[in-house]
Amino acid sequence: MHDEERRHLGSQFDRDAEGYDAGRPDYPAEVYGRVLAHLAVGGGDRVLEVGPGTGQATGRVLATGAAVHAVEPGAALADVLRQRHGGDRLTVEVATLEDADPEGPFDAVASATAFHWVDPEVGLPILHRVLRPGGRVALWWNVYRDPSLGSVDPVDEVVRSTTELPNTRGLNGILDELDLPRRLAEHGFVDVEATTHQWTITHDEASLLALFSSFSDMRKREPAERRLVFDRLAELVRANGGMITRPCTSPMITARTPS
C-alpha cells in the first residue's frame, strides 16, 4: 500500500467514530489471552498502543494495571477513547506513529488491527528505539474471512460482484505483502513469532451491515454504490434465515527487543 493510499483510507475511520465503534466486533478471548500473556505487563509498566481506535484493546491492557500511551491519528476516535477509558493511566497523542513523538522507555507495544496502516520502515525503528531492552511487542488483527479455506465466502462474493474496491487483496493480502515477521527481525527484534487463531462469527442483518460500514474502503464509496452493496448483503442474510456465520482469522505477531 502506497503512503498516499494508506493515509487516505486510514482517515476514513474518523468520519464516524461511533459507527466504527459499533460495527467492529471484539477480539476472541483466546487472542487476548495469548497477546496479554506475551506482553506480561502489570502495575508500574508502560505500554505504547499504536492505533487504538475507540479502545477495545486499550481497556484490556489497562485492566492489567499498566499505563497506556495511545498514539491515534483520528481526533474523533481519540475523543471516544478518552471518554471511555480516560484516567491517570491513559494518555492519548493524536498523531500517526510516523509523526508521533512517544517518550520512552516503554515495557511493551500493542497494536490491534492497526499496524498495517503504519509504514514499517519508519514505524519499526521507532518501536525499537522507545522499547526498553527486553521490551515486548504484540501486533494482532481480526480478519473477517479465512484465507486458508478453498471455498468462496458468499459475503465476499456479494461484495466483489457489486463494487470495485480499491484494494482487492484484502487485509490478509496486505499482511502477506508487508511481511512483518521478516521486517521485525531485520530491524533488530528477536524471538519473532507469527501465529493465527481461527474462529467464527454469526451476523444478523444489522451487525453485518454495521461491520461493512466500518471498513475504510467501503466508507469512501459513493452513496448509491454503497447502498447497492448493503442491499445485496441484506438479501443474502435473509436468504439464510436471518443469520449468517462466517469464518474469521486472527493473525498475531509477537517479538521483543534484545535484553
Image (tube, rainbow, N blue to C red):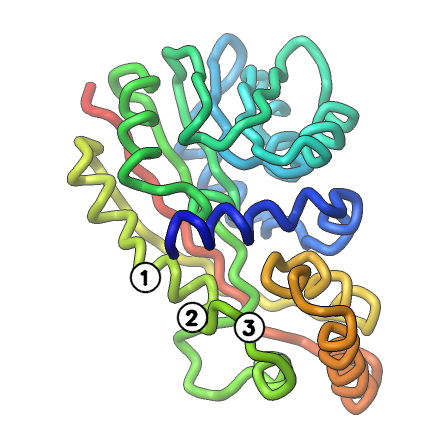
- Taking the spot 72% from the left edge, 62% from the top edge, the residue there is 213
Q: Which mark is residue 169?
A: 2
User: Looking at the picture, how far across and down is residue 193, in whole percent?
Assistant: 28, 46
Amino acid at the residue labelled 3: Leu
Q: Residues within 10 Å of mark 3 (few under 14, many from 20)?
A: some
- Number of numbered discs on residues: 3
Do the residues bearing badges 1 and 3 touch, measured as CB atoms within 8 Å? Answer: no
Q: Which residue is mark 1?
A: 176
Label 1 sits on what residue type? Asp
Quadrant holding the N terminus: bottom left
User: Are the two marked residues, 2 and 1, in contact with CB atoms closer than 8 angstroms?
Assistant: yes
- Badge 3 marks a residue whose secondary structure is loop
Which of the pair 163/197 is nearer the observer? 163
From what the image shows, is residue 200 above or below residue 116? below
Task: Where is residue 134? Give x, y as percent.
Answer: 27, 21
Can you tell which of label 1 and label 3 is closer to the viewer?
3
**Residue at the disc numbered 3:** 165
